[in-house]
């Protein structure tokens, strides 16, 4: 479970990531109707991370978007702000809708970084 202090520390970073994802989906898919955009990140114990961005289009197709520098910089900040000890999470997903609604899911399993199918899904 994440504490209130943890939430206060990461909330501004998550809000900025949501804003950047929303703008990215609108700029990358201006002529297509996207339904959601998902940022999926896995943090390892050495301080590194892997990430992917997928846009779910209204027609059911899924499209990849390259991670731009401004999002990568926010992910570095998020990695540094993650809780330590028993509250440390290793996976982070942020989904943003066309209405601007956001959903965050955290994965507390350190093995989530070892998913061999991470980039194919």
Image (tube, rainbow, N blue to C red):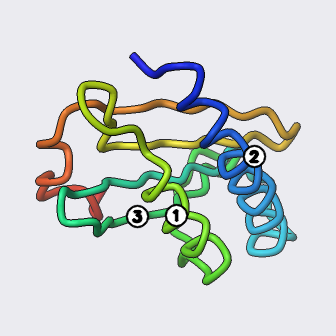
N-terminal of the pair, mark 3 or mark 2, is 2
Pointer 3 with pointer 2, Cβ within 8 A? no
Q: Position of residue 106 (x, y in %)?
A: 41, 32
For label 1, the residue is 75
Q: Earlier in the sequence, mark 3 or mark 1?
A: 3
- What's the residue at 32%, 39% (across, down)? 84
**What residue is rendered at 18% in x and 65% in y?**
46
Rate crowding at label 1 as few (under 14), some (14 to 19) or many (20 or more) other CA atoms within 10 Å: many
* Figure quadrant of residue 35: top right
Q: Where is residue 111, by image quadrant?
A: top left
Q: Residue at x 16, y 41 (%)?
A: 110
Q: Residue furthest bottom?
A: 69
Q: Secondary structure at mark 1?
A: helix
Residue that mark 2 sits on: 15
Residue at label 3? 51
Asked whether the residues under the numbered discs 3 and 1 touch, taking CB atoms below 8 Å apart as contact, a structural biologist would say yes
Left or right, residue 113 beside residue 47: left
């Amino acid at each position: 479970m994440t504490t209130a202090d943890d939430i206060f520390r990461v909330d501004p970073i998550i809000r900025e990531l949501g804003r950047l994802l929303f703008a990215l989906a609108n700029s990358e898919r201006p002529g297509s109707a996207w339904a959601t955009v998902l940022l999926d990140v896995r943090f390892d114990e050495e301080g590194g991370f892997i990430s992917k961005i997928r846009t779910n289009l209204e027609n059911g197709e899924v499209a990849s978007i390259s991670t731009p520098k401004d999002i990568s910089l926010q992910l570095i900040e998020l990695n540094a702000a993650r809780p330590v000890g028993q509250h440390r999470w290793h996976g982070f997903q942020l989904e943003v809708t066309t209405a601007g609604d956001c959903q965050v899911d955290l994965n507390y399993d350190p093995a989530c970084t070892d998913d061999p199918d991470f980039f194919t899904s």
